[in-house]
Amino acid sequence: MEPARILVRLPNWVGDVVMATPALAALRAAHPGAEIVAEGRPYLAGLVRGLASVDRFLPEVRATSGRVRALRGERFDWAVLLPDSVRSALAPFLARVPVRAGYARDPLRRALLTRALAPPHAAGRRVPISMVERYLRITRALGCADPAERRTALAVDAAAASAVAKRLDEAGLAAGARALVLTPGASFGSSKLWPPAHFAAAADAIARRHGLAVVLAPGPGEEALAREIAGSMQERASVLADPPTSLAELVALIGSAALHLGNDTGPRHIAVALGTPTIVLIGPTDPRHTAHQLERQRVLREDVACSPCGLKACPIDRRCMTRIGPDRVVAAAAELLA
């Protein structure tokens, strides 16, 4: 039966949402007449705004009972569940959505789904694959062909772009100035953080060599880190921290940048989706999860025995991050800006 209304439960991480956009495009291409509703944490609304593959955003109701009532009222035909949690599948099950698809790692999650996929594995062990491919496997299981371009994509909101231009003007940046955008934080945990002194040294060198204006865009709670980096720099740097940029504004800012530099976090994937050259510092996470559209990226890693560990806080000295020197970042910038 052709679905008239499709619910897509988005992942909670910004980068994962961006890497799910090819799967959203696959759903749209296979069912052009269906209403596709993206459900997720409220702050994610600005990330999917303007996508042709999403008709509407539904803010997640945290209480299961309230979420069940909301989903029953929507009368969805399909629920495409991108997170692996039992919680994300429970409300669609209780709301009696006829088709419920996603991965199942345990019997309870499997019982809540009508189309349960086993996570990628070989010889009894999980296999790390690109999250783009991981999400496309769900839509393939629903009979949706892959999109012609398996590339991530975002739309820049006009109002957000205007707000960013105003903030940059107030910060003293001339209209049209070529910017190096730094996103130095990591909501995942401290293990992902490149040292502030390294950020400052690399940003100074890149700004001088390539004539770029430095803009720091910290997320909520990262303001002090951004100000520490700006205060350690010799070149002038603007910090957009009061208030922090919204996700829609961050998309607009990164989309207009000449270069992005950051840790292995959501802004990296925003840059990739918008075609902005990006330099990524990666340590505790497995690079195979994000190995896509690498042509305008430089992914810098240090080959240490304990990486990737997947830990949010390093129990030793964060050597996988601290040993990536600013000189490697400066060299990568020269390659990308050539």
Image (cartoon, grey):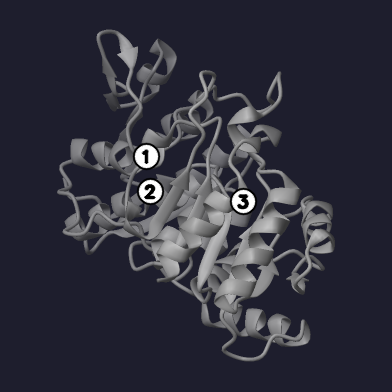
Pointer 1 or 2: first along the chain: 2
Secondary structure at numbered mark 2: loop
Label 3 sits on a secondary structure element that is helix
Res 220 → quadrant: bottom right
Would you name the residue on which mark 2 appears? 20
| Mark number, residue 131 | 1
Q: Please tell me whether mark 1 or mark 2 is closer to you in this view.
A: 1
Q: Are marks 1 and 2 in contact (CB under 8 Å)?
A: yes
**Most foreground residue, 226 or 132:** 226
Between the residue at mark 1 and the residue at mark 2, the CA separation in whole angstroms equals 7 Å
Q: Which residue is mark 3?
A: 326
Where residue 295 sits, quadrant-wise, is bottom left
Q: Quadrant of residue 102?
A: top left
Q: Is residue 254 left or right of residue 244?
A: left
The quadrant of the rendering that contains the N terminus is top left
**Dot placed on the residue nearer the N-terminal end, 3 or 2:** 2
**In the figure, 234 relative to 192: above or below?**
below
Q: Position of residue 78 (x, y in %)?
A: 31, 43
Q: What residue is rendered at 29% in x and 57% in y?
A: 151
Tell me, for residue 121, which label it has, or none. none
- Name the side, left or right, on which 65 lies relative to 106: right
Check disc 2 and give the amino acid type.
Ala
Q: Nearer the viewer, residue 323 or 18?
A: 323
* Contact? badges 1 and 3 (CB < 8 Å): no
Task: Give the residue displayed 48% in from the left and 67% down from the top.
Answer: 49
